[in-house]
Image: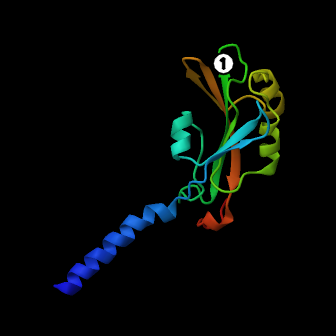
Amino acid sequence: MRTCCLAVLVCLAITAAAPGNSFRDDSHYVALGPRTGYYIVRPGSALSRQLGLEGAPTRDTADPFNHGYGADALAFRFNKTGILSAVPAYIVQATPNEFYVRRIGSFIRGRTTLHEVETLFGRPRRIESRPDGFIAYYTIEVYNPFEDRGNGTH
């Protein structure tokens, strides 16, 4: 009886600890100036929900159907006139790409326009309407060879 109870307790402890270890949420804000900066956000994180970015077009590289191929996203919130109303967010699964971090950090809240963002990144992959404006999403294709469990036919 004691062995059975001990086994159950060990299983419960492992199950309770697993979610904390399997998802490292280090989402945060990086301030660069009074109206410049950016968010680094993990998909599904509390900060992602707080910022309203659940609709970001990301794909998990760990998904067995993606074979290591996935997508991170950039999110830009604009007011109804197409002016950046909040600092951008980089929704990233692993390590942020320095190229994108530098670019999004250069945009100024309250001054940068949709046209200026499109000049740098092209047309948005997806636009999500909001009562106060819209969010423009851009997809960044990523590949993680450690998650590629395919048969090499890509």
Percent position of residue 138, x then y: 69, 36
In the depicted structure, whether residue 93 falls above or below residue 126: below
Label 1: few (<14), some (14–19) or many (≥20) C-alpha neighbours in 10 Å: some
In the depicted structure, whether residue 45 falls above or below residue 104: below
Q: Classify residue 105 as left or right of residue 28.
A: right
Percent position of residue 19, x then y: 44, 61
Question: In the rendered image, is residue 117 in sight?
Answer: yes
Query: Quarter of the image holding residue 15?
Result: bottom left
Look at the image and name its color scheme: rainbow
Q: Classify residue 14 as left or right of residue 62.
A: left
Q: Which residue is mark 1?
A: 79
At a point 73% along the width and 19% down the height, the residue shown is: 83
Question: In the rendered image, is residue 54 in sight?
Answer: no
In the depicted structure, whether residue 16 falls above or below residue 44: below
Q: Classify residue 92 as left or right of residue 99.
A: left
Query: Quarter of the image holding residue 130?
Result: top right
At a point 26% along the width and 75% down the height, the residue shown is: 8
Can you name the residue that lies furthest to the top here? 81
On-image quarter of the N terminus: bottom left
Q: Nearer the viewer, residue 74 or 68?
A: 74
Q: Classify residue 136 as left or right of residue 101.
A: left
